[in-house]
Structures are given as C-alpha cells and as structure tokens.
Amino acid sequence: MRNKGFFKRVYEVARRIPSGKVMTYGQIAEILGSKDARKVGWALHGNKDPGISCHRVVNKEGKVAANYAFDGWREQKRRLVAEGVTFIDETHVDLGKHLCATID
C-alpha cells in the first residue's frame, strides 16, 4: 500500500507533539511536504498503536474529532484536559494557548 510510508511518517510526527500541546492536521501535512490534511486524518483514524498521541491532533479551528475512538470527541477532550489543555467551548481547543508551532 502506497500510503503506508506516509501514514508511518504521520505517526512519527504525532508522537513528537508535547503533552499539553496540539497540532492541526494541516500542520502535520505541511511538515510532511503535503497539502492533504484529510490524508493525515485517515492515517490517524486508522492508527492501532496507543503510544501515538492522536488525541493531540485537531482541525484548523481547534475542533476535536467527532469520530475519535471509543467515546468519540468526549474521549479526545478528556485526554487533552488531563494534559492541561483548555477549551474555548465544548469542542474547541484554545489554539492561542496550546498550538504547537514546531516539533523537535
């Protein structure tokens, strides 16, 4: 499968997002030299490794994923709140405080 290499690279970036920070699908796509944020979402949705910090990836408005694993967006929000991430409303992360501009 051609996406396998891309998906693996998405997971490598997601692993490096620090606790208490988030990145957008678009940011990850850009880091990987792509414009396809949707493909980043597909990769994260298909992830089976609990060690990959998929919960730290949100859309460009800071919204958590409606179809996040287990309890949907509520589970993603619980994981982020446990790391100290704050929200501006029920489903949107405060990007002004928590957006990770770069990764090591």
Image (tube, rainbow, N blue to C red):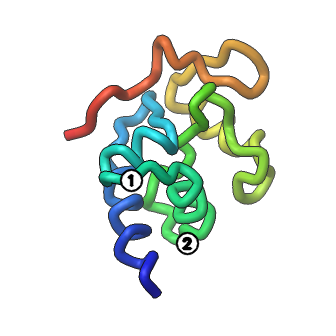
Q: Position of residue 82 (x, y in %)?
A: 57, 32
Q: Name the amino acid type tagged 2.
A: Lys
Q: Is residue 15 above or below residue 88?
A: below
Between 26 and 85, the one nearer to me in the picture? 26
Q: Name the amino acid type tagged 1.
A: Ser
Identify the element where label 2 is drawn: loop
Q: Is residue 19 left or right of residue 31?
A: right
Crowd band around label 2 with a 10 angstrom C-alpha radius: few (<14), some (14–19), many (20+): few
Sequence-earlier tag: 2 or 1: 1
Q: Is residue 73 above or below residue 47?
A: above
Label placed on residue 48:
2
Q: Position of residue 23 (x, y in %)?
A: 45, 36
For residue 74, what is the image quadrant? top right
What residue lies at 19% left-to-right and 40% top-to-bottom?
104
For residue 80, what is the image quadrant? top right
What residue lies at 43% left-to-right and 68% top-to-bottom?
7
Q: Is residue 68 left or right of residue 82?
A: right
Q: Which residue is mark 1?
A: 34
Crowd band around label 1 with a 10 angstrom C-alpha radius: few (<14), some (14–19), many (20+): some
